[in-house]
Amino acid sequence: MGESAVEFYTLPPMADTLIVSVSGLRGVVGTSLTPDVAVRYAAAFADTLPPGPIVIGRDGRTSGPMLAAAISNYLTGIGRDVIDCGVAATPTVGIVVRDEIAAGGIQISASHNPAAYNGMKLFSRAGRVLSAAAGKKVLERFQAIAPSDETRPLAETVGDVREVDGTAAHVRLVAATVDVAAIRRHRPRVWLDSGHGAGSRVAVPLLEHLGCEMVIEGGEPDGLFEHLPEPTAENLAGMLPRIAAAKADVGFFQDPDADRLAIATADGRYIGEEATVALAVEGVRAKRPGPIVVNCSTSGMAAAIAARHGVACHISAVGEANVVEKMNDTAAVLGGEGNGGVIDPRVVLVRDSFVAMALVLERMCAGEALTSIDALARALPQFVMKKTKVDLSPEIRGPALAEALVRIEKAFPEAKPDRLDGLRLDWPGGWLLVRSSNTEPIVRLVAEDRDAAKVDEALARAASALLQ
């Protein structure tokens, strides 16, 4: 199997529930994730970086200031300068790292995890999440530092802390990718749920710049989540009726660090996260024809759109870093993942909900009259995607699981197999992905086809072969 940028590791007794990956860590604040743990991880990261300042940002979680202060105090104590972004979206942190020519960056966020969690995501000096190779070095260094170790003696000269607000730069970069005049002409009414995360910091000035009318929910970045923060249909059920009540033209939902966007229609129909990348591809392809990249668990909508317009769609392993690597290798004009993360290299090589918003609004405003988001969604290639998981008993883990994947492959003789990330099987019109979770003793199964019956049959056939 190919190395994935979301390969997770669980540390032994010191932190039973602390999850550390090659691109960051997350845990429950006060138990597995404490200021001491955060400092150890920051120390490990700093050890791998070249000279230069380190950027720190955070989403709106209430534990963010405590963790940011501990990390900043440690870094300045060892002589590193710190650039403090305060509350900032994850892609904004990437922009600041790049623009300030920093050595690297740390975003304090647990992404879509519930409020009790927090975490740290790491950026290279290029302003993108760490590659798997770079992240592995941090992980190995972190595991080598015992909890009781003094991580580093204080430097003779303490580092400086400088505040940088990357909001204006982010707004300017996103606005430059779309036809601002067309959006201003139609003045669409946008209902946005920033989920009490960092998203409103850029979303409000961006939508103002685009001339949109706005209804903002959860705009205060205080971490007091009104619903579970992952923007799924189930979690947003109580919010969807508010879109129609506000007489909005479109509904947008961000996760707490604002790197993902889910979309709903004016009447509150959730069209989801999978459609976000597809709509963005449609928005880009006419103006910037060129290859795109999606990961191997993303809906085939984007690939079908690319094929319709005669451009290549490349497939990467799951994980933002893997998508970015493939984008760089193929000179892609756009990339993304089915969780609602769109990556536009003109802005920053980080998943960015603001890019997705702008591209969707531009599509809605491209004609003489405003096109409804419902019409745009219904014009997308139509597929049925279903996801399930299978609990693994101890006897079918490790080598036995590899044997199970062989059985699944043999159960689909009509399909073309690929081992880029787990096992993916492709057939005309559909596909199946089987990947083991690195955080739980389960296997995730994802299937998609234009025919719902084929999706159900594929999932059942795969589960049967897995459990033989």
Image (spheres, grey):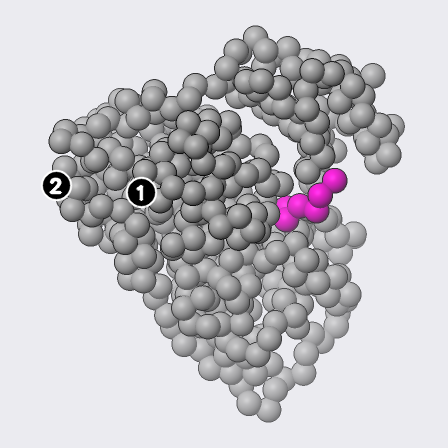
Position of residue 302 measured from the top left corner of the image (x, y, whole percent):
46, 31
- Residue 64 left/right relative to 13: left
Q: Amino acid at mark 1?
A: Lys
Q: On the image, numbered disc 2 is attached to which residue?
A: 185
The residue depicted at 14 percent of the width and 37 percent of the height is: 186
- Residue 344 left/right relative to 30: left
Locate residue 96: give its quadrant. bottom left
Q: On the image, numbered disc 1 is attached to which residue?
A: 287
Q: Is residue 4 magenta?
A: yes
Q: Is residue 261 above or below residue 351?
A: above
Residue closer to the observer: 249 or 327? 327
Q: Is residue 11 magenta?
A: no
Q: How many marks?
A: 2
Are the residues flagged by discs 1 and 2 in contact, CB closer than 8 Å? no
- The local secondary structure at tag 1 comes to loop
Locate residue 48: give its quadrant. bottom right
Q: Is residue 45 above or below residue 109?
A: below
Report the span colored magenta: 1-6
**Residue 166, labelled with which disc?**
none
The residue depicted at 41 percent of the width and 76 percent of the height is: 162
Extreme residue toward the bottom, this view: 156
Position of residue 375 measured from the top left corner of the image (x, y, whole percent):
28, 22
Quadrant containing the N terminus is: top right
